[in-house]
Image: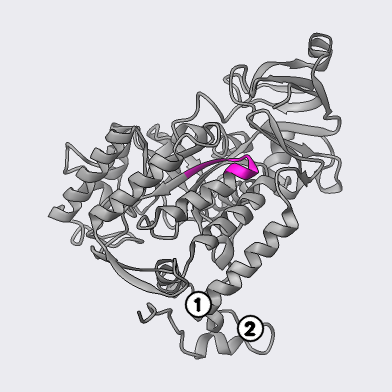
Amino acid sequence: MEDLLLLHGTIVTVDTERRIIEDGALAISGGRIVEIGTAAELAPRHADKKVIDCRGKMIIPGLIDAHGHAGHTLIRSIAADTNALWMRVVTPTYYHYVTRDFWYADGLVSGLERLRAGVTTAASIITSMPRADDPIFAINHARAYTELGLREIICVGPSGLPWPHPVTRWESGKPERRNITFEEMIEGSEAVIEAVNGSGDGRISVFLTPFTIVPSVEPSNASTPDQAVNLTGGDRMQARRVRETARKWGVRIHSDAFAGQIRMAFQDKENALLGPDIHLQHCWGISHEEMDILAETGTHVTHAPPGRSTPVLEMMARGISLAITTDGVSPSRHFDMLQTARLFQSTQHILHNHDRYLLPPGKVFEMITIDAARVLGMEHEIGSLEVGKKADIAIIDMRKPHLMPNWMPIHRLIHQVLGSDVDTVIVDGKILMEGGKVLTTDVDAALDFGQREALALADRAGLHAHMHDPGWGKLQRTFTEPVQLPQAPDC
């Protein structure tokens, strides 16, 4: 860890005054920001520090993705042409065909994608529906992010129904089928917390993550009032055990929620998975009553564009903390938070509200920096460039044709900057990427490893039927041939 002085850049602080400092300077010592100001002010006072020349560059807080899925990187595009069946393809794949090496490979590849795009903190749910029966999955993913030097929140917890849940492990090289009880999922989550929470010099955290806050209703879509009526015994048991475990280990909680679930969860006044220590992803189609519950309980919300009927502006008007997320990269997305923010702004402006003044670029940028830090309970450490905070920083090369002219930096960020424009990334005061070159791992070796593990997974799961490329003249095949779903291996 070196003492650094970033010199002559345009600094977008996202501090309480939302300062933008032209020809700015930022000093780093001991992994934290120790002074911010103009180059003329700081250069004489920090002559002993290593200088990074930021002429023609923009200095911003490291970007934050508060909800994404581990495992997505190495199945990208699988079942992309059969979107309605996507979960039915990938969930059996994750529960029956992944290996421990797969998770290390996915950690390296996903971490590299995020690092190159200036994402310094990211939440990673282990599979599409959380899987916690083998702690090594999460431990290996965290190991990759630790080696890269990034900040990661590992999200593990109980799966959705049914309980016990069938899983397959491959430790011996052959499939071994098991049925995992709810309590075994809690035990597996605790093992992950014990192994990696606070590791990587404090960069790795663990959040307890049940699939949804109310498991008895539709897990991936809104439930109508006649479907979402009263909590079941299983709903109350999950909430109680998740609350007990989170208190035991002092960890935060993260989960998905959809219309009907918030109103139902609120029936359990003692253990409801609602409150300031929780952020909920999606919240599609929730009612005014449910928005009021979120505001009353101080529950945070995260949203991945384009989203299905998530009442973003109505929640924000009630003072609910809300951040933009990627929701992972499969079947056809990416970890570029700036492009994701641009999609969010355009869908809100054009598709939902027809009003370009509701979400200006500055507010949208806050939703992938300081607002995202707030929903994670980390706003005192990251999310803005302020004295005393962690030195998590992305430096963007603005000397590119699509970023000219070099003015109105917030508009440039949200309207034109791409993740590939990130030149240098610093986390905890350590340079992880400089001049576009990753310094903490062999990129080619990591990508080769990821390719091998992706192909091995496809072989185990028989996913080749989902890997054809329709191209031109073959498009009809996508819609007429039957879709073969992965089945659990015979044991």
According to the image, label 2 marks what residue?
470
Residue 323, how many percent across, how many down? Answer: 49, 40
Q: Looking at the rendering, in which quadrant would you find the N terminus?
A: top right
Q: Is residue 491 above or below residue 136?
A: below
> For the point 86% across and 47% down, which residue is it?
401
Q: Which residue is drawn at 40% across and 31% down?
A: 319
Residue 151 painted magenta: yes
Give the quarter of the image for residue 413: top right
From this viewpoint, is residue 83 visible?
Answer: yes
Q: Is the C-beta separation of discs 2 and 1 under 8 Å?
A: no
Callout 1: 10 Å neighbours few (<14), some, many (20+)?
some
Q: In this orientation, does residue 286 appear?
A: no
Report the front residue among 276 and 178: 178
Q: What stretch is highlighted in magenta?
A: 146-153
Q: In this view, does 245 lie to the left or right of 134?
A: left
Q: Name the residue under label 1.
A: 460
Q: Nearer the viewer, mark 2 or mark 1?
A: 1
Give amino acid for label 2. Answer: Pro
